[in-house]
Image: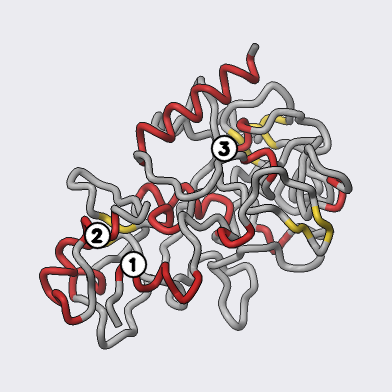
Amino acid sequence: MKRILVGALAAATILAAVGSGNAGPGNIRWTVHNLAKTAPWANASNRHWYSSEVDEVCIFCHTPHNAKPAVPLWNKVNPTQTFRMYTSSTTLSSTAKAVTAPGPESLLCLSCHDGRTAINVLHNSDVGVDSGDGSGDKRVKMAGLPLTDPSNPNVQALAMGSLPTFGTPYRANIGKTNSDTYAGYNLMDDHPISFSYTAAYGQKGSQYLNDINAVKAQGFRFYGPNRDRMECSTCHDPHVDYGLDFDGIPTGSPTGNKKLRPFLVRDNDGSAMCFACHNK
């Protein structure tokens, strides 16, 4: 019952928060975002990271109790470092250049993908060890990861680079620099985020961008009070089943669409994702 409640609440909250328009089938159980002890495909133990003790799926991102923030029932410790944002393009609008920090929706993604914040610290979990800092956050044992950083066992968000058994840099680490694989703050080589698309369109107009309604019609989602702010989840949906082929091992996903890898809201055939927003 508890697993059903967690899954139902998480799904309902996500839909309320981001709206509809997912171009692909949503079945997170068949994706690398399933960090549960077991997974529905063969050779699940070959996953890069997964829990050695938790068999729930939704709990690694969502919780019905003690969520931070309450929407979308978030169960992860979010990054607190200062990020360096994308600013280099001469074609970038001034509204995008003015962004100094990721928006709240993108911070949710960065809580795993900044390359620095621990993926095994949850606000609310039935299992795991309390972080020891008074927050009540718990660490969950992950296969291939020590439970704590031996050099600083009471830290709330572990620096990924300090984990002695970490091995190769983990996937989708977008905060790295050329000199520091685990820097956790460098977004200068990634698509700009957290800006008003409407304002950018007003500055660049049809010279570079398409009208936001045409973009939304293709399944792209925008955020903020005016529903026009571009974030990581504008182009990516963490629940999309893209026919996972993990390290060359087919999983046999019954519904996946490989064209949606990695968690795209629509396929990118012929750069279709790019042209949804950009007209050249």
Q: Quick one: SS at disc 3?
A: loop
Q: Which residue is mark 2?
A: 214
Work out which residue is located at the far top of the displayed protein and give it. 1
**Relative to 256, 236 lies left or right:** left
Q: Residues within 10 Å of mark 2 (few under 14, many from 20)?
A: few
**Relative to 227, 179 lies left or right:** right
Residue 84: name its quadrant: bottom left
Relative image position of residue 177 (x, y in whole percent): 56, 77
Q: Quick one: SS at disc 1?
A: helix
Relative image position of residue 280 (x, y in whole percent): 30, 83
Going by the numbered disc 1, the residue's amino acid type is Ala
Q: Quick one: SS at disc 2?
A: helix
> Contact, CB < 8 Å: mark 1 with mark 2?
yes
Relative image position of residue 60 (x, y in whole percent): 63, 37
Sequence-first tag of 1 and 2: 2
Going by the numbered disc 2, the residue's amino acid type is Ala
- For the point 50% across and 55% down, which residue is it? 110
Viewer-nearest of discs 2 and 3: 2
Q: Which mark is residue 61?
A: 3
Please tell me whether residue 224 is drawn above or below residue 99 in the rendered image. above
Residue 211: name its quadrant: bottom left
For marks 1 and 3, give the CA distance.
Answer: 29 Å
